[in-house]
Image: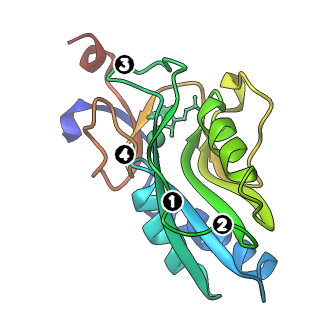
Amino acid sequence: MLSDMDKILIGEEELKEIIRGLGERISNDYKGKELLLVSVLKGSVIFMADLMRAINIPCRIDFMSVSSYGAASKSSGVVRIIKDLDNVVEGKHLLIVEDILDSGKTLSYIRGILKTRNPESIRICTLLDKPERREVDINADYVGTCVPNEFVVGYGLDYNELYRNLPFVGVLKPEIYVK
Ligand code: IMP
Ligand code: MG
């Protein structure tokens, strides 16, 4: 797996530091509020697991799964719900937890659906942001860090469902994609 990597963009220590900072901000901002963390499967599971432990106020978690990408590394633009939330959203403060904000289509779709269920508030927390790639008008309220316009894997992010278990975020060698 390591030999497939071209370079490491964000190492383990840096990820820890980023998440510690996000957890602190979120804990301060939502003090005394009913916080529901909504993880978008599957890419955000590792981030979610670390982020929730960096949050020191009571919170609930839930999971939602949508499809937008096939095996290809480019968006098909198709988004649909595969798994919906278990929790009632009405009156809750929702924080959508995503691995990466790319074109913005996925989050825009998810936010749109959740809004219709009358939550008290909705915000977005993304580990990674690729602002250059945005196609719809959406931004995250909490951003771990921005990454250049390159396809990244690791720490939950996949290429063809692989590489999610890498403990860092990195870029694959170009020849991996053309195989
Ligand atoms: P968007 O709808 O284009 O913003 O895409 C968001 C989703 O696409 C993310 O949740 C990821 O699953 C996937 N994605 C976008 N860019 C990358 C990348 O560089 N590496 C891995 N997955 C990505
Ligand atoms: Mg994803």
Whether tag 2 and tag 1 are in contact, CB under 8 A, the answer is yes
SS at badge 4: loop
Distance in Å between CA atoms under marks 3 and 2:
33 Å
- Residue on which the image places disc 2: 89
Whether tag 4 and tag 3 are in contact, CB under 8 A, the answer is no
Asked if disc 2 is less than 8 Å from ligand 1, the answer is no
Residue 98 lies, in percent from the top left, at 56, 50
Q: Residue type at mark 4?
A: Gly
Tell me the mark number nearer the camera, choosing from 3 and 1.
Answer: 1
Q: Is residue 125 left or right of residue 64?
A: right
Residue at the spot 59% in from the left edge and 73% down from the top edge: 20
Distance in Å between CA atoms under marks 3 and 1:
27 Å
Asked if disc 1 is less than 8 Å from ligand 2, the answer is no
Distance in Å between CA atoms under marks 4 and 3:
16 Å
- Of residue 114 and residue 146, the one placed in the foreground of this image is 114
Q: Is residue 123 above or below residue 131?
A: below
Point out which mark residue 72 bears. Answer: 3
Distance in Å between CA atoms under marks 4 and 2:
30 Å
The quadrant where residue 158 appears: top left
Residue at the spot 50% in from the left edge and 79% down from the top edge: 53
The mark total stands at 4
Tell me the mark number nearer the camera, choosing from 3 and 2.
Answer: 2
Residue 54 lies, in percent from the top left, at 56, 78
Residue 68 lies, in percent from the top left, at 48, 29
Point out which mark residue 85 bears. Answer: 1
Residue at the spot 62% in from the left edge and 51% down from the top edge: 126
Whether tag 1 and tag 4 are in contact, CB under 8 A, the answer is no
